């Protein structure tokens, strides 16, 4: 009962202009799907955050549509699917830039420790921080390979460097021509 009263009060205040209108909504209930997807795709393309994280953070202090709503919109609209796919591909390039920043940032690779007497300081290498940076880089590289495989995916050498004594190369030469039809004269 209270929620229906609160909703009617909220509607009246919105009509009176006391509640600012949500920039991504058409009215109190309906989303402007086009504007919402443009914002979401822009956030994806220019960050390393996932869809769920973007939706939970919101837009200028306002909420964003639920994850399930966005999935429904994607399943219903080819235009939104293309926008989303393009944003995810662009995100791979953003991740490449982030990798450079992570690799070049040596902050916290070394830390100061106080000795047992509590007076003298020593500088020690922080393996944990370096390993964490390595994990962040490897995770981004893996994601880049999945998001944009032609550019960032692992290249598989099926010829094994075209080594003449390679068993696969020898087998390929032996089988070559075996499937060709035999001409009878």
Image (cartoon, helix red, strand yellow):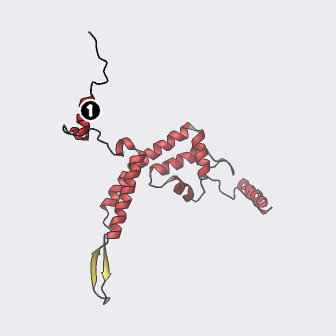
Q: Nearer the viewer, residue 106 or 33?
A: 106
Judge whether residue 58 can be spotted in this image: no
Residue 59 vertical position relative to residue 169 in the rendered view, above or below = below
Expressed as whole percent of the image width and height from the top left, the position of residue 34 reads 58, 43
Image quadrant occupied by the C terminus: top left
Q: Is residue 157 left or right of residue 73?
A: left
Q: Residue furthest front?
A: 184
Image quadrant occupied by the N terminus: bottom right
Residue 176 vertical position relative to residue 142 in the rendered view, above or below = above
Q: Residue at 54%, 55% (x, y): give it.
A: 52
Q: Which residue is mark 1?
A: 172
For label 1, the crowd category at 10 Å Cα-Cα, with few meaning under 14, some 14 to 19 and many 20 or more, is few
Residue 113 vertical position relative to residue 126 in the rendered view, above or below = below
Q: Residue at 24%, 30% (x, y): give it.
A: 174
Q: Residue at 57%, 46% (x, y): give it.
A: 35
Q: Residue at 31%, 80% (x, y): give it.
A: 113
Expressed as whole percent of the image width and height from the top left, the position of residue 136 reads 38, 60
Q: Residue furthest right?
A: 1
Expressed as whole percent of the image width and height from the top left, the position of residue 79 reads 54, 38
Expressed as whole percent of the image width and height from the top left, the position of residue 14 reads 71, 55
Q: Nearer the viewer, residue 143 or 93?
A: 143
Judge whether residue 76 can be spotted in this image: yes
Q: Is residue 26 left or right of residue 133?
A: right
Which element type, helix, strand or loop, lies under badge 1? helix
Q: Residue furthest top?
A: 185
Residue 157, located in which quarter of the rendered image? Answer: top left
């Amino acid at each position: 009962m209270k929620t229906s009263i609160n909703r009617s009060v909220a509607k009246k205040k919105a009509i009176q202009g006391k509640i600012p209108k949500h920039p991504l909504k058409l009215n109190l209930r309906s989303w402007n799907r086009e504007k919402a997807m443009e914002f979401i795709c822009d956030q994806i393309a220019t960050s390393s955050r996932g869809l769920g994280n973007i939706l939970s953070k919101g837009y200028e202090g306002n909420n964003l549509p639920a994850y399930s709503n966005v999935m429904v919109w994607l399943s219903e609209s080819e235009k939104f699917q293309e926008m989303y796919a393009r944003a995810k591909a662009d995100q791979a390039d953003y991740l490449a830039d982030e990798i450079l920043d992570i690799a070049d940032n040596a902050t916290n690779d070394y830390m100061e420790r106080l000795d047992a007497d509590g007076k003298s300081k020593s500088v020690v290498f922080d393996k944990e921080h370096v390993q964490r940076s390595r994990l962040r880089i490897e995770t981004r590289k893996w994601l880049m390979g999945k998001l944009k495989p032609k550019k960032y995916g692992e290249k598989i050498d099926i010829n094994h460097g075209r080594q003449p004594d390679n068993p696969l190369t020898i087998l390929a030469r032996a089988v070559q021509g075996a499937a060709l039809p035999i001409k009878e004269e």
